[in-house]
């Protein structure tokens, strides 16, 4: 977008705010832009409208000083020397800034030279030269001041940079120290965890060994109890067998006696001889004595 376009956008904003001074400044510099692109008639129309607006708004001539200076230049470009002188004198008489006054003095010098009034042309040319020298000296002083300020500023920035680097170096050293400290803590924590792992492993192995020993002891005790129980049962078996044996002998004797007696009784009853019966009875009696 062109400079004129930017000024038109600004003009709309000042118009909404009803800011007369802002409107005058936008229109004035729009006219200056037309002068810069060598369109003096458009510049003239724009600047005359600005002057008309300023009069209606009752603004002071001092506010229109740049407008008068640019009007003087515009009239000079369309060869209207009298109007160039008129607006040039208005611009010079106003309380102008140096750059506006410089443009007005240049227009007046050129305009008077074209009318043949070389004395006035020389006067305004001299005034412009003095103003140029003043501006040049001011520019020199300003440049020296700017250089000095720049040197002071750069020196200050350099000093601040050095201080900042020192602070950063200290912070970096502190951070490095903190990192070393953190690493040491992590290593100690890792070693502690490893130690805990070793101790826990040993505890588990010991607990497992103790459990194994306890189970072995329990098994031995159960085995011992079983052996004792078996030994008791074996002793009881031997005792029972002995008792049974002792009981069996009389029973066998009684059984044998009963069988023998039974046989003798059968022989007794079958015998017909008294003598034989007496012998059998004697045998039965002998068996009973045994």
Image: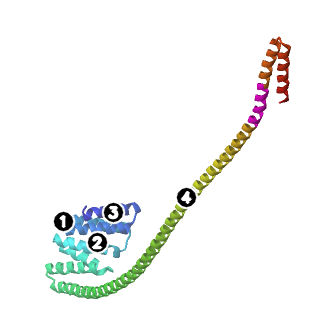
Q: What span is colored magenta in the figure?
A: 243-256
Q: Secondary structure at mark 4?
A: helix
Residue 221 in sight from this viewpoint: yes
Q: Is residue 159 above or below residue 264?
A: below
Label of residue 39 in the image: 1
Between discs 1 and 4, the one toward the N terminus: 1
Between discs 4 and 3, the one toward the N terminus: 3
Mark 1 and mark 4 residues within 8 Å of each other at the beta carbon:
no
Query: Foreground residue, 153 or 227?
Result: 227
Q: Is residue 6 magenta?
A: no
Quadrant of the frame with the N terminus: bottom left
Between discs 3 and 2, the one toward the N terminus: 3
Label 4: which residue?
204
Mark 4 and mark 3: span between their CA atoms? 90 Å
Q: Secondary structure at mark 2?
A: helix
Between discs 1 and 3, the one toward the N terminus: 3
Is 207 placed left or right of 190 in the picture? right
Label 2: which residue?
67
Residue 285 image offset from top left, x and y in percent: 85, 24
Q: Residue at x 80, y 19 (%)?
A: 264
């Amino acid at each position: 977008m062109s400079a004129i376009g930017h000024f038109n956008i600004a003009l709309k904003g000042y118009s909404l705010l009803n800011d007369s001074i802002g409107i005058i400044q936008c229109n004035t510099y729009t006219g200056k832009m037309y002068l810069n692109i060598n369109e003096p008639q458009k510049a003239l129309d724009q600047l005359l409208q600005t002057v008309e607006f300023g009069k209606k708004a009752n603004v002071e001539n001092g506010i229109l000083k740049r407008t008068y200076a640019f009007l003087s230049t515009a009239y000079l470009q369309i060869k209207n020397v009298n109007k160039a002188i008129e607006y040039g004198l208005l611009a010079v008489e106003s309380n102008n800034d140096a750059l506006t006054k410089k443009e007005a003095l240049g227009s007046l010098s050129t305009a008077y030279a074209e009318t043949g009034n070389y004395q006035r042309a020389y006067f305004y040319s001299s005034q412009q030269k003095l103003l140029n020298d003043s501006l040049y000296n001011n520019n020199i002083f300003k440049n020296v001041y700017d250089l000095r300020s720049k040197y002071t500023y750069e020196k200050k920035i350099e000093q601040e940079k050095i201080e900042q680097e020192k602070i950063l170096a200290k912070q970096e050293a502190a951070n490095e120290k903190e990192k070393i400290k953190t690493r040491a803590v992590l290593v100690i924590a890792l070693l502690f965890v490893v130690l805990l792992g070793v101790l826990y492993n040993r505890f588990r192995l010991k607990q497992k060994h103790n459990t194994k020993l306890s189970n072995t002891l329990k098994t031995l005790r159960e085995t011992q109890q079983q052996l004792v129980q078996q030994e008791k049962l074996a002793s009881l078996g031997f005792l029972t067998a002995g008792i049974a044996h002792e009981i069996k002998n009389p029973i066998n004797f009684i059984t044998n006696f009963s069988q023998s007696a039974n046989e003798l009784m059968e022989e007794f009853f079958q015998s017909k001889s008294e003598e034989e019966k007496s012998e059998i009875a004697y045998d039965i009696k002998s068996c009973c004595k045994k």
